[in-house]
Amino acid sequence: MKNFGAILIFFGVLCILCGSNEKPVDDLQGTKWISVINEGYVDTLFFSDSTYISYSVELGYRSYGTYTTNEDTVKLIRIGDYAIFDNSYHPSEKPVKFYLIKKGEKLYYIKRYFMENNTWIDSNFEFDNYYFTRLNSAN
């Protein structure tokens, strides 16, 4: 009977540890999204297994990081940038966290945080209805 109690406690702890609502992959995996800035100027966002790559035409660089989802919310954590001019990757001095809301075939940026002294700080940046539209499906 002691073993049965230990087994119940083990599975209870396991369920708590594995019970996070965030998951690294979902229907975003393998998709490409675009945001038309102006005619001929397009930002892009690509999702793979649990990572993403984005290109900002305004800033002129690619960034990369990880993503997780929780229902209709997508969390991106930028961990580095790709310098096109010298073809090299550079880790971010300060990681940046973005939250997006998925509404149908669109992803809207809603929040941006930066890391300061190991604490996420809200940047209070306003995105002015900036969104990405899905170009392809996950299949």
Image (cartoon, rainbow, N blue to C red):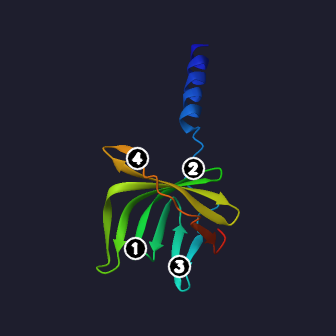
Q: Where is residue 73 in the image (x, y as percent from the top left)?
A: 60, 52
Q: Distance between the residues labelled 4 and 2?
A: 23 Å
The residue wearing badge 1 is 59
Q: How many marks?
A: 4
Element marked by disc 3 = strand
Residue at 65 percent of width and 61 percent of height: 27
Q: Which amino acid does label 2 sit on?
A: Lys
Comes first in the chain, label 1 or label 4: 1
Q: How far apart are marks 2 and 1 (CA)?
A: 30 Å
- The quadrant of the rendering that contains the C terminus is bottom right
In the picture shown, does residue 15 fall above or below 137?
A: above
Element marked by disc 2 = loop
Q: Position of residue 57 (x, y in %)?
A: 45, 77
In the picture shown, does residue 61 fall above or below 119?
A: below
Observer-side mark, 2 or 1, equals 1
The residue wearing badge 4 is 121
The residue wearing badge 3 is 42
Q: Distance between the residues labelled 3 and 2?
A: 28 Å
Q: Which amino acid does label 3 sit on?
A: Val
The residue wearing badge 2 is 23
On the question of residue 70 being in view, the answer is: yes
Comes first in the chain, label 4 or label 2: 2
